[in-house]
Every structure is written in structure tokens, then in C-alpha cells.
DNA sequence: ACTGAAACCTACGAGGT
DNA sequence: ACCTCGTAGGTTTCAGT
């Protein structure tokens, strides 16, 4: 992993469909050299996935909220997680150290659909304490971490 | 936007480098038809970006934390935001309704680098109240919302 | 939406700097 | 580890139906 690889990764983050020939012209490297580096980067697993980010607004999902919650006991964990995994509007779930056990990121249409969603979650067996935080606007969202260039 | 488009979007979410010909064979549509749909989907802006997600672990970023904070007054906002935007380890920033003004998602190497990061943020002019929540593990991370299929 | 042909991109050599 | 060149195979694109 040198700075050339990092440049390639950054170009892929900007547009994961860039062709090897376009990368080649941007970083002054021949196409086969770029192609080899791409293969190696894929093999190392540093690229977790090639994906697309969809516009929440265009899909009429205008509400983003964070929800903290705790479980009464760890025995509810497995059932809780499988319900979380199946719900496409719950886009993130992290296990926490602190006052609450979990934080969820939920993206949904409206206050009405949010209300239903909150009820649904609060009715999952074992869910005890919850706290809901509404996001008014998103200042920054990088989706992935960005590799740091190596200084000389 | 019909269910065929949604299938295409889901395939792209699984792998944004799938070729039109591969999509074509999976959804029983000719390659030019897929290609046209792709163009239209691009034009509508429903696809926010084609990108790659990098492995945090492979980049030695093992710590993920959420940080809440408030500003003393809105006049600090612009300077605060520009500092946030420049920091690659701050991957998200949302403006909130509630006890705190902002929530940040921070991904960093170690407790040492986290300590520095927290100090840095607390020293931004106007930052008043902060609360830090450490994530122990990630149960789910979809990066993007998933389109819902239309029922008949 | 489909077919078919031209243009483009990629993958994989060999041989060399 | 990289470059050039050439070739083969796959992919995209544009016309016409």
C-alpha cells in the first residue's frame, strides 16, 4: 500500500465505475499496471464492497433519526438482532458501552411512518429504555473512511 | 421506477461494478434495455454516488465513536463546520433537535488517537458541551437505504 | 424492447527498460 | 515493479426494426 494505491482508492470512492484506462490517465501509470494494482487491492480485502448510495430524498425518505435503546437482559439479544436485520429502514445498529446498549440509525418517510417504526421497536421483546434523537440536517456523510496518504 | 429498476438498483448495491450484460442475464432483459435503464436511473439522481466502502480494520481504524456536542452560539457554526469537513476521521455530522446540537461519527485507530481527536474537537471555538459514546461492535451497517419493492 | 455491428475496454501474453 | 505492443474476449453503444 503506497500513495499510488491510495490515489486509486480515492478515485474509486469518488466513482467506483471508473475504468482502468481513466485511472491510468489520471495518475500517469499504464493501464496494465493499474489493472494489476486493482487486482491486488481486491485480493487484500481492503475494499469491503463496491456499492451505490441511493438518494434518500428521491426515495421519499426525509426523516433520519438516531435511537438509543437497552435490553432487559442479554437473552433477548438474538431475537432483537434478527428483527433489526430484517428492517430495511434500520440502516445501522451498533452495540455500545455506556447508558444504552444499542444505537440505531433509522431512515423513514414521515413522522407517521416514524411513529409506527418506534412503536414496532419498542414492542420488540426485551426492549426496555429508549431515547430518540431527530436529525434536522446532515452536514457531512462520507459513508466510508478515507485512506490517509503517507508522508515522506 | 418499477420493480425492474429496483432489482437493478439492488444488484448495484451488492456490486456497483456489475456489467450491464450480467444484470441483463439476471433479470431477463436485453443488454441495451438494461443500459438505457441505467442511464435513466443516473439521470434522475436517485443514485447519489457509485462508491467503494473501505475496510476500517484493514486501515487500522478499530475505534468507532459517536460524539454529541453543542455550540455556545450559532455564530461559531461556519468555522466549526469547515473544521469538521476537513477531518477525514470524522465521517458523519448531523445537526440535531434536542439536548445537543450535533452528533459526529468518528472512526480512528486507537484510544491514543481518539484522545487527541476529542481534545481537538473540544478545542474548536464555541464547542461547549460534549458527550462521547464508544461503539463496541457493529451489528448492521447498510451505508445506503434500500429501495422497497412495489406490491401488486 | 430486441437484434446486430462498430467502438471501446480489459485481460493476458511476450519482450524489454 | 513498470512499460509497450499485440491479440483475444467481453462490454457498451448506436443504428434500425
Image (tube, coloured by chain):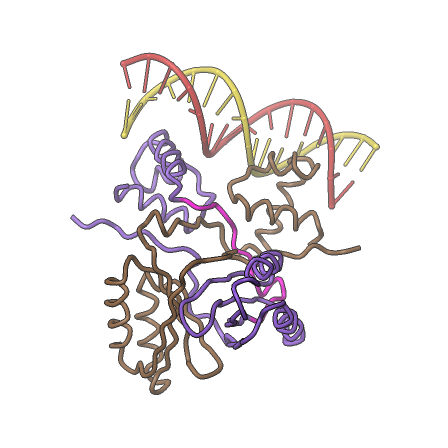
Chain colours: A brown, B purple, C yellow, D red
> Residue at (47%, 62%) from the top-left corner?
B94
Query: Measured from the top left, where is residue B81 in percent x and y?
Result: 56, 59
Magenta residues, start to end: B47-63
- Describe residue A80's horizontal placement relative to residue B71 as left or right: left
* Residue B107: % across, % down: 57, 66
Side of A54 relative to D8 (left or right): left
Label count reads 0
Answer with left or right where residue A10 lies relative to residue C7: right
The structure residue drawn at horizontal position 70% and vertical position 36%, both measured from the top left corner, is A28
Q: Hey, which residue is sitting farthest left in the picture?
A: B152
Horizontal side of C1 relative to B120 (left or right) equals left
Vertical side of B32 occupied by A112: above or below: below
Q: Nearer the viewer, residue A149 or A77?
A: A149
Tell me where residue A101 sits by quadrant: bottom left
Quadrant (top left, top right, bottom left, bottom right) of the N terminus of chain B: top left
In reply to whether residue B48 is colored magenta, the answer given is yes
Amino acid at each position: 500500500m503506497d500513495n499510488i494505491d491510495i490515489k486509486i482508492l480515492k478515485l474509486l470512492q469518488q466513482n467506483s465505475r471508473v475504468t482502468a484506462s481513466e485511472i491510468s490517465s489520471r495518475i500517469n501509470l499504464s493501464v496494465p499496471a493499474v489493472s494489476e494494482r486493482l487486482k491486488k487491492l481486491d485480493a487484500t480485502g481492503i475494499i469491503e464492497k463496491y456499492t451505490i448510495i441511493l438518494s434518500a430524498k428521491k426515495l421519499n425518505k426525509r426523516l433520519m433519526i438516531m435511537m438509543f435503546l437497552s435490553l432487559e437482559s442479554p437473552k433477548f439479544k438474538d431475537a432483537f438482532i434478527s428483527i433489526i436485520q430484517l428492517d430495511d429502514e434500520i440502516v445501522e445498529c451498533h452495540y455500545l458501552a455506556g447508558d444504552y446498549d444499542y444505537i440505531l440509525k433509522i431512515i423513514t418517510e414521515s413522522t407517521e411512518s416514524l411513529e409506527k417504526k418506534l412503536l414496532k421497536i419498542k414492542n420488540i421483546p426485551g426492549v426496555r429504555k429508549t431515547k430518540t434523537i431527530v436529525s434536522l440536517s446532515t452536514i457531512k456523510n462520507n459513508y466510508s473512511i478515507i485512506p490517509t496518504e503517507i508522508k515522506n
